[in-house]
Amino acid sequence: MALKAVVQSLEDVPEAFRSLYVEGQGGTFRLDAEGVEDVSGLKSALQAEREERKRAERRLKGLDGIDPDEYAALKKAAEEAEKKKAADEGNWKSLEQQLNERHLKEVTKHTERQKLLTAALEEELVDAAASRALAKHGGSVDLLLPHVAARMAVVEENGKFVAVVVDENGNPRVGEKSNRMSVDELVQEMKANQDFGRAFEGSGASGSGASKTEKAGGGTPGVIALGDEQAFLANLDKIAKGEVAVQ
């Protein structure tokens, strides 16, 4: 029985001769004897060379009929076009970034201007409404305007900005008959106040908020005209105690 020079597995060799084989390249086993060389590496190189030659032949076949110089010129032109395209894209990206930054600055500038205009409009609306109500009820605009304005805000209704009376949470206050409190009502409320009432002219209110119709001294009940709503509201406690009469 002849022994093979190279085997893929020792299982292919009778057990008695397996000791005569040594491991070669690529996981094969070769007969360890003089004149027997491991040529598996050469075979692999030869196989790779043959495959590369086939691929080269296929590429050359695809270029059949094309002038080599013309092909080289076309290839160079394509490379130059790719470089120019990359450069143009880089320039455009830089320009696009500049445009975006400029647009952002313009938007920010416009937004800040809108805030300033809105704040000025709100202040004008509040001051105008408060000043009218104070003048109507004989209040000192210089003294009371900041206090009235602090109790007001501007809201948008049906596309228009309106100055309204608000509470400490910024919600519109409720006035008489569950309607929204008017600026006049706010001013009247302040007029009846012990502290703010002093800043009104001809209200008849003293530091205690008493009506000008109340008679002083002797415990004699004062008299309030039936239609004097302001005096009525300012003297509710005294009316209840019988100290002030309504006629």
Image (cartoon, helix red, strand yellow):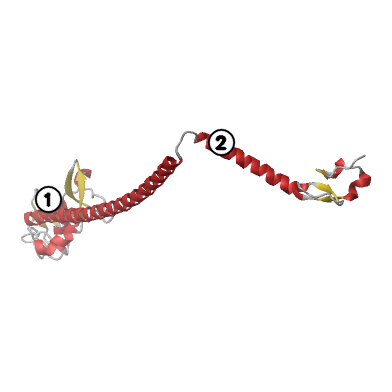
- Residue 82: percent from left, percent from top: 39, 46
Apparent side of residue 47 relative to residue 187 in the rendered image (left or right): right
Which one is nearer the viewer's eye here, 190 or 160? 160
Which one is nearer the viewer's eye here, 124 or 210? 124
Give the Cα distance between marks 1 and 2.
109 Å
Which one is nearer the viewer's eye here, 168 or 92? 92
Quadrant of the drawing holding the N terminus: top right
Q: Amino acid at mark 1?
A: Glu
Residue 133 seen: yes
Apparent side of residue 110 relative to residue 24 in the rendered image (left or right): left
Relative height, residue 172 to residue 195 (above, below): above
In this figure, which residue is indicated by the disc labeled 1? 229
Residue 235 seen: no
Q: Amino acid at mark 2?
A: Arg
Which residue occupies the extreme left position in the image? 202
Say whether disc 1 or disc 2 marks the residue closer to the N-terminus.
2
Crowding around mark 2 (Cα neighbors within 10 Å: few <14, some 14 to 19, many 20+) is: few
- Residue 147: percent from left, percent from top: 17, 61
Which one is nearer the viewer's eye here, 201 or 59? 59
**Residue at position x 38%, y 49% in the image:** 83
In this figure, which residue is indicated by the disc labeled 2? 58
Crowding around mark 1 (Cα neighbors within 10 Å: few <14, some 14 to 19, many 20+) is: few
Q: Helix or strand or loop: what does disc 2 sit on?
A: helix
**Residue at position x 86%, y 41% in the image:** 12
- Residue 208: percent from left, percent from top: 16, 64
**Residue at position x 35%, y 48% in the image:** 84
For residue 168, which quarter of the picture?
bottom left
Q: Which mark is residue 245?
A: none
